[in-house]
Image (cartoon, rainbow, N blue to C red):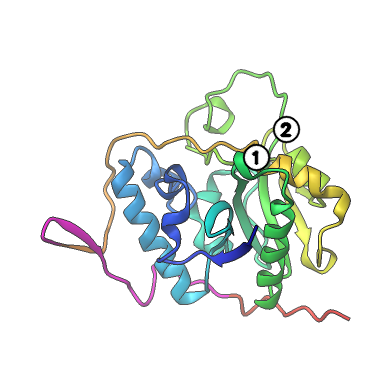
Amino acid sequence: MTRALVPLSMSSIGDLPEQCRSCVTWELPSSAAVGLESDLAGFEKEVWLSGVMLTWGSAGQIVTVDEKPAGFALFAPPTAVPGAAAFPTSPVSPDAVLLTTARIMPEFRGQGLARFLMNGVIKTLTSRGVRAIELFGVEQGDDQERVAGRLDGQGEQELPKCLLPADFARAVGFTDIQTHRRYPRLRFELASGIGWKAEVESALEKLFTVITIPAPKAALPELVRVRSSEGGRMKLRLRRVPDEPVSTQNSPRLSCA
């Protein structure tokens, strides 16, 4: 068995599950992401990724086994993830990168791939001078009536549905930085995470296999797009400067003894 880590890029984005490729609830403001058709959402995800790559770098890692995609982790600076503003525990700390989702495919569980993947994420982000990883967790066992994926069941804002369970995040070293009965924000200091402890490997495997990513809905909001059509096929045009530039100049590099 040969396992490897592949940075998320325009050439590797096709290795993500279709539901993830066509979900932009993190990458677009909540009002714009609701109801996008699958093909249009996939195009918008590529536009977003190209902008982040040009200004910051790869926004994820894909783990492969014998060159077959087995899992992934997606992350980005908070200024590049407008969908995070929908959470009651936002904003993400400016010195952190937001881990939006992570998953190991069920058929590859039990092989230590979650630990391998997250060690790669930690190494990559530490080398970029990032100080911490934050995520929005979801508390389990809340029996209040809610509309799935909507904030507090009121239906005002659409929330991403691929959240990591808060209890599992705590089990692998994340700590609460902003508490909430449903959507706490948790943080992992990278200085303390150079190499996950072996005893949390089982929790990692569970963490990344319980996440489901629902398919998007239909309907088209107004969006500004950069695209052209040739021969009936859509082509992506890269823009050098995105609407909201991303910077990590305030994130000092870590020095490890």
Q: Position of residue 135 (x, y in %)?
A: 67, 51
Q: Please give the name of the residue rendered at 51% of the width and 64% of the height, measured from the top-left corner.
A: 8
Mark positioned earlier in the residue sequence (1 or 2)? 2
Tell whether 79 sits left or right of 2: left
Mark 2 lies on a secondary structure that is loop
Q: Please give the name of the residue rendered at 27% of the width and 69% of the height, measured from the top-left corner.
A: 237
Q: Are marks 1 and 2 in contact (CB under 8 Å)?
A: no
Name the residue carrying label 2. 181
Q: Nearer the viewer, mark 1 or mark 2?
A: 1
User: For the residue marked with disc 2, what is the amino acid?
Assistant: Arg
Q: Please give the name of the residue rendered at 86% of the width and 56% of the height, measured from the top-left corner.
A: 197
Above or below: residue 246 compared with residue 150: below
Q: Position of residue 76 (x, y in %)?
A: 56, 62
User: For the residue marked with disc 1, what is the amino acid?
Assistant: Thr
Q: Quadrant of residue 170?
A: top right
Above or below: residue 148 compared with residue 123: above
Tell whether 159 sits left or right of 3: left
Name the residue carrying label 1. 209
Q: Position of residue 206 (x, y in %)?
A: 72, 39
**Residue closer to the observer: 235 or 91:** 235
Q: Please give the name of the residue rendered at 68% of the width and 33% of the height, measured from the top-left corner.
A: 182
Q: Which residues are magenta?
A: 230-247
